[in-house]
Amino acid sequence: MSIVEAFNQYFEIIPANSDALRQEVYKLRYQVYCVEKGFENPEAHPDCMEYDEYDVCSSHYLIRHIESDCYMATTRLILPDHHNPKKLFPIEAHSQINKAMLENINRSHLAELSRFCVSKQFRRRANEQDLLVTNDDLNDGDFSRKKEKNNSANLTLALFSCSMRISTEHDIRYWYAIIEPALKRVVAGFGIHVIEIGPPIDFRGTRVPCFIKLDDMLNSVAKKNVNYWNMLTHYGDYQIKS
């Protein structure tokens, strides 16, 4: 059984393309960022939904655990503003980027990975949320089958696959990302190698501003393991224009 088939036995990737589904995104983010992690002030979100000014120009995805019918992970891609191409992405507002490294990049094809978020129920350890590798310390009450525990380790690739789907839909060819060093090491194991474009910053812990060229990433992942490539692109359904 392939990685994709195994993952799809237990999880479903869903575009948050309605008001109701976007509310599920914001409620999950509130639970993780305000309640569990304390990154955001709960009092600033009295409706128990975490959202910001970038959500109106973002595309969102959810990952649903089929058996429990619970949304357990989400991510967004902050899209370029085609009416204001010079509008700053969060990474540009909060870090020092080496702009010379990106001078030939068409901003209409550039987006920012953001809000990789997974429920505590599915995290391996409370202090490793950003790794999104969740198959170690689950007890029997969390999942009933060992296979399902093992498949939860593919959440990282699944969330990247969500961003690939958005990128295909919106002709995105490059990603910005502010990445925690441990996550950077994890994704390198899948063949996802990021380019550091500035010094580390202190943003909810140490983070590194990075850049990813999507066709280079897909080629690298395919060389590493075709099963990873299949998960990332859903057997080639989601690829990038050159």
Image (cartoon, rainbow, N blue to C red):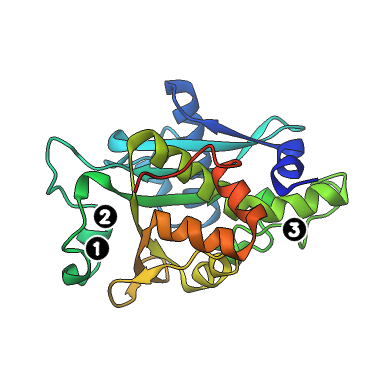
Q: Position of residue 120 (x, y in %)?
A: 63, 52
Rendered location of residue 154, percent (x, y): 66, 53
Is residue 60 visible from the viewing direction of this image? yes
Q: Height in image: 71 above or below 110? A: above
Q: Quarter of the image holding residue 43?
A: top left
Asked whether disc 1 touches disc 2, contact meaning CB atoms under 8 Å apart, the reply is yes
Please state the horizontal and vertical placement of residue 9, each as a whole percent of the image: 77, 37
Q: Name the residue beneath numbered marker 1.
A: 94
- Looking at the rendered structure, the secondary structure element under dot 2 is helix
Residue receiving disc 3: 135
Q: Nearer the viewer, residue 182 or 127?
A: 182
- Amino acid type at circle 3 is Asn
CA distance separating discs 1 and 2 = 6 Å
Residue 90 shows which numbered tag? 2
Residue drawn at x 12%, y 40% is 84
- The answer to whether 96 appears left or right of 69 in the picture is left
Cβ–Cβ below 8 Å for labels 1 and 3?
Answer: no
